[in-house]
Amino acid sequence: MTAAIDDELWSAIGDPIRRRMLDRLLADGGGTATTLSAHLPVTRQAVAKHLGVLDRAGLVRATPSGRERLYHVDEAQLARAVAQLSAVGATWDARLQRIKRIAEAIQRSQET
């Protein structure tokens, strides 16, 4: 797992429109740029560009469907993102616990 891949993954997920697209694809079991644009405040062309970003990050896979491409969420890549987010959360929880212990120790030393 390289930092560049992670940056691309999190950059893709970081955009609110792309997160809404992922939510919609998960809820509907897939979709095209046309079907997604009907539910989003952006044009079909903008949706297609966002899908390209999600595809490059490995978050969606496309299959030809007539004149369009049908997109599905790559659940393995999404699970990888969730695992990374959980690991980051656990790291921050541990850091905050250490800060809390230090602050409590300082407070106790000032009370004596």
Image (cartoon, grey):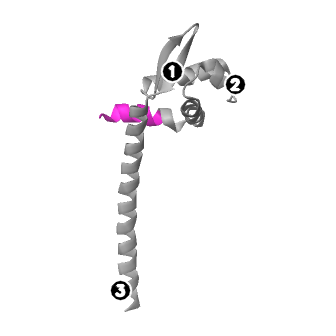
Three-letter amino acid code at disc 1?
Answer: Gly
Determine whether the residue tagged by mark 1 lies in a helix, strand or loop: helix
Say which residue label 3 marks.
109
Classify 24 as above or below 64.
Answer: below
Residue 17 in the image, given as x and y percentages of width and height: 60, 33
The range drawn in magenta is 1-11
Determine whether the residue tagged by mark 2 lies in a helix, strand or loop: loop
**Residue placed farthest to the front in the image?**
29
Say which residue label 1 marks.
52
Residue 63 in the image, given as x and y percentages of width and height: 48, 15
Three-letter amino acid code at disc 2?
Answer: Ala
Residue situated in front as seen by the camera: 76 or 105: 76
- Left or right of 107? Residue 21 is right
Q: Looking at the image, is mark 3 or mark 2 nearer the viewer?
A: 2
Mark 3 vs mark 1, CA separation in Å: 57 Å
Mark 3 vs mark 2, CA separation in Å: 61 Å
Quarter of the figure that contains the N terminus:
top left
Classify 63 as above or below 30.
Answer: above
Quarter of the figure that contains the C terminus:
bottom left
Counting every numbered tag in the picture gives 3
Residue situated in front as seen by the camera: 110 or 105: 105
The image quarter containing residue 77 is top left
